[in-house]
Image: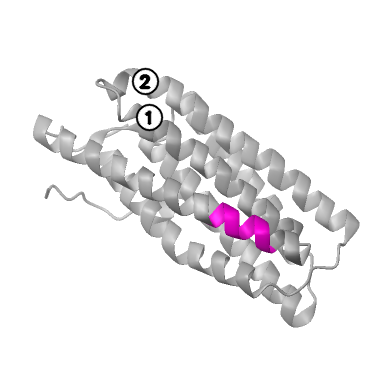
Amino acid sequence: MSATHTPTERRRHVLQRRIGWIVFATIGYNVVEAVVAITAGTIASSAALVGFGLDSTIEVLSAAAVAWQFTRRDPERWEKGTLRVIAFAFFALAVYVTASSLLALITRVEVEHSPVGIAITALSVVVMPFLSLAERRAGRELGSATAVADSKQTLICTYLSAAVLIGLLLNSLIGWWWVDAIAGLVIVALAIREGLEAWRGDACATSVGTILEEPGTHNDD
């Protein structure tokens, strides 16, 4: 990982606390999101919406691993193990989205209109990129591969939110039931790539997460 400067000890503590607050916010949001999405998906018979809710539980696992790491006295010591947990979260996401997307394409289950599902996925498209960007900025400045990897997990979950939202809207408006399944398979490829990078400890490499990257860092507390 390249860095333009080494944070002072005081700045490191600020960044560690900031990352802690971000991941706790991510966990809280995703718990609510999972409950709402799974309930709405069950009512509407939407495999994509239920899958979206289950994906939120995977995001909780990834964020919880980072939160646990940054409660340790020496967070850097637990970097490799936490990256492996995040990698498994990426792979679990890829397996589930692959299975649910293929099942949706094969079975062609009739999905009912779900205003609640549309609302929760639309909200996620707005909220999750900000959480991802904030965590990635802090993680890069701190030099934490785990925080950067978790921010990418959050960003991929944003893409999944957008795919499910588009699928729900097109299914409701013009009956294009297959759109979210196709988009899900594209997201699988991204999830596998990010999982491999996290497993290798290459979470700071240029990848899908950099689309929200802005040059420069802020050193203000």
**Disc 2 from disc 1: Cα separation:** 9 Å
Colour logic: one colour
Residue 159: tell me if it is visible: yes
Contact, mark 2 vs mark 1 (Cβ under 8 Å):
yes
| Depth order, front residue of 150/34 | 34
Check the image and report above or below for 27 versus 119: above
Left-right relation of 189 to 19: right
Check the image and report above or below for 48 versus 10: below
According to the image, label 2 marks what residue? 78
Q: Quadrant location of the N terminus? A: top left
Q: Residue at x 74, y 45 (%)?
A: 98
Picture quadrant where residue 166 is located: bottom right
Q: Tell me if residue 38 is in the magenta stretch.
A: yes
Q: Residue 86: percent from the left, percent from the top?
A: 50, 33
Q: Secondary structure at mark 2?
A: helix
Picture quadrant where residue 58 is located: top right
* Crowding at mark 1 (Cα within 10 Å: few <14, some 14-19, many 20+): some
According to the image, label 1 marks what residue? 68
Q: Amino acid at mark 1?
A: Trp
Q: Which mark is residue 15?
A: none
- If you read the primary sequence from the N terminus, does the residue marked by circle 2 or circle 1 appear first? 1
Residue 5: tell me if it is visible: no
Q: Residue at x 68, y 51 (%)?
A: 51
Left-right relation of 89 to 178: left
The region drawn magenta spans 33-40
Prevailing SS of the magenta stretch:
helix
Which residue lies most toward the top here? Answer: 77
Foreground label between 2 and 1 = 1
Q: Amino acid at mark 2?
A: Trp
